[in-house]
Image: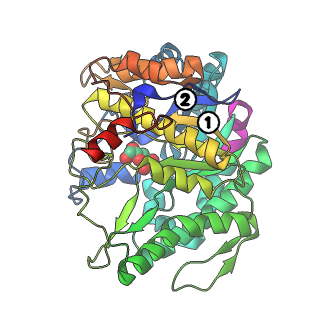
């Protein structure tokens, strides 16, 4: 059995970057011009239980966020700029909004914090939505138009870019695949724009969700898992490596701008997916195994599986890897510390076993924020008071702070932060199995 209290000391490479992340709509508040806000107000979407409202009020509290990052020892911060603030109406740019982001970047830099900017994190202007958003290829020019305006002004203060966040989500239905293709092309052309103004490294944050058959020997589950793996993960990595977009039911397409568009693999890792070919949505719900659930306090079937992360890293050794998101949704904060330790151990294993070149880790999330339809799912290292918006770090934030300070982890460090957990002895594999053989003889 894995004993985290006995983990050997491990130091991450020199210059390893430690930080956390957020996204505009999830923290800023009052993002009234994007499609999500409109969807929240319409009341038409049953998966939206609460509107975003003031979120964490970060638009008014940028300095508080910087203070928190400093207090917690973070060396890097990944956040997104909100397109709908900068271009609230097509072709009408709000320079003051852009200047506010620039001021934030300057302050982060002045505090010695690496600035990592995401240019599209799930939200876009309502006017763009009304034109069909990313369901139509001809709309990509609106996105690149926005980038051409914003990127040259942000570039002097930006240390790394994720042009788009998690464009690989969605079902295997034809419409969802078409959208994925449009988004991949938007990334390709967008990254070319970014590279024309900035020498900082560029990537697309990929939601890495390895897909496995529910019944390993079942031909249909196996085929469905392959299909899901391709349309969720492999089409993206293949596209960036070769420039080819290969998706089911579509002719293959070669997009030169896509080839080598990523300078590093930006991996958002939360969970694996078990695929059940006997269900319409192919999502397995028989998941009561020994792996942790990513959403501990909610019925979501997201199973955190550190070994799967290790295996996935083995396929990404052709570029440096940044873990741009990883975290857990729980109200039992001690579990966040356990989860984090397991993830660090998985990173160590991937680095040692496969020479995975992992160079950065951004915990999701700095704050308990708006989790796309609810405030009840809390991923934050710090809680946020609903009325005053005061930020209060949780104990797990101090475990992470110690990890950052040590640029490493160890059983001892973990034990310091989990005094209430039972400590058990790990079997020493190097010693002869005395007791076992005595028992066997008896
Ligand atoms: C998204 C975040 C989200 C997180 C937790 C990621 O897929 O990028 O916006 O909050 O997962 O669900």
Q: Position of residue 390 (x, y in %)?
A: 33, 17
196, 244: nearer the viewer: 244
User: Residue 294 or 117: which is nearer the viewer?
Assistant: 294
Give how far apart the Cα atoms at labels 1 and 2 are. Answer: 8 Å
> In the depicted view, which residue is nearer to us: 344 or 330?
344
Structural crowding at the residue carrying mark 1, measured as other residues with C-alpha within 10 Å and reported as few (<14), some (14–19) or many (≥20):
many
The answer to whether residue 299 is left or right of residue 83 is: left
Can you say which quadrant of the picture contains the N terminus? top left
The residue at the point 33 percent across, 36 percent down is: 435
Colouring rule applied to residues: rainbow
Residue for badge 1: 360
Would residue 108 be found to the left or right of residue 167 on screen? right
Q: Mainly helix, strand or loop, the magenta region? A: helix
Depth check: give the residue in front, 405 or 91: 405
Q: Nearer the viewer, mark 1 or mark 2?
A: 1
Q: Is residue 263 magenta?
A: no
Question: Mark 1 touching mark 2, by CB under 8 A?
Answer: yes
Query: Can residue 38 be seen in this snapshot?
Result: yes
Lateral position of residue 312 relative to residue 337, left or right: right
Q: Is residue 152 magenta?
A: yes
Label disc, if present, on residue 75 of the rendered structure: none
Q: Which residues are magenta?
A: 150-158
Q: Quadrant of residue 54?
A: top left
Q: Residues within 10 Å of mark 2 (few under 14, many from 20)?
A: many
Which residue in the structure is indicated by mark 2?
A: 19
Q: Does 3 appear above or below 266?
A: above
Q: In the image, residue 127 lies at what x, y percent?
A: 46, 58
Q: Which residue ends up furthest to the front in the rendered image? A: 441
């Amino acid at each position: 059995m894995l004993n985290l209290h006995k983990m050997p000391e491990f130091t991450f490479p020199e210059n390893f970057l430690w930080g956390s992340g957020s996204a505009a709509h999830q923290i800023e508040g009052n993002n009234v011009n994007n499609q999500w806000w409109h969807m929240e107000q319409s009341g038409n979407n049953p998966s939206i239980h609460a509107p975003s409202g003031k979120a964490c009020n970060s638009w008014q509290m940028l300095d508080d966020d910087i203070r928190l990052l400093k207090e917690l020892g973070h060396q890097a911060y990944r956040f997104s700029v909100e397109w709908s603030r900068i271009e609230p109406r097509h072709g009408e740019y709000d320079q003051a909004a852009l200047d506010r982001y620039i001021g934030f970047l300057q302050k982060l830099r002045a505090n010695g914090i690496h600035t990592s900017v995401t240019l599209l994190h799930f939200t876009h202007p309502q006017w763009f939505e009304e034109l069909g958003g990313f369901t139509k290829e001809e709309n990509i020019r609106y996105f690149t138009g926005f980038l051409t305006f914003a990127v040259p002004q942000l570039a002097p203060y930006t240390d790394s870019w994720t042009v788009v966040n998690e464009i690989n989500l969605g079902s295997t239905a034809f419409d969802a695949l078409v959208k994925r293709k449009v988004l991949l092309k938007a990334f390709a052309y967008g990254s070319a724009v970014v590279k024309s103004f900035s020498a900082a490294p560029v990537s697309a944050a990929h939601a890495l969700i390895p897909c496995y058959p529910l019944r390993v020997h079942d031909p249909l589950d196996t085929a469905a898992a392959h299909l899901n793996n391709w349309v969720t993960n492999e089409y993206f990595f293949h596209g960036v490596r070769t420039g080819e977009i290969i998706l089911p039911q579509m002719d293959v397409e070669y997009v030169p701008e896509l080839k080598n568009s990523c300078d590093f693999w930006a991996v958002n890792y939360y969970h694996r997916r078990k695929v059940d070919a006997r269900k319409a949505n192919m999502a397995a719900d028989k998941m009561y195994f020994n792996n942790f659930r990513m959403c501990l306090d909610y019925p979501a079937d997201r199973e955190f599986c550190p070994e799967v992360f290790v295996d996935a890293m083995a396929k990404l050794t052709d570029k440096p890897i940044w873990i741009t998101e990883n975290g857990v949704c729980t109200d039992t904060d001690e579990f966040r510390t356990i989860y984090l330790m397991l993830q660090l151990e998985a990173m160590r294993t991937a680095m040692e076993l496969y020479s995975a070149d992992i160079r950065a880790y951004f915990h999701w999330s700095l704050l308990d924020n708006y989790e796309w339809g609810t405030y009840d799912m809390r991923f934050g290292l710090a809680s946020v008071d609903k009325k005053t918006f005061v930020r209060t770090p949780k104990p797990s934030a101090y475990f992470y702070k110690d990890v950052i300070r040590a640029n490493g982890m160890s059983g001892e460090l973990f034990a310091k932060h989990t005094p209430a957990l039972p400590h058990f002895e790990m079997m020493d594999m190097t010693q002869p199995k005395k007791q076992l053989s005595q028992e066997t003889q008896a």
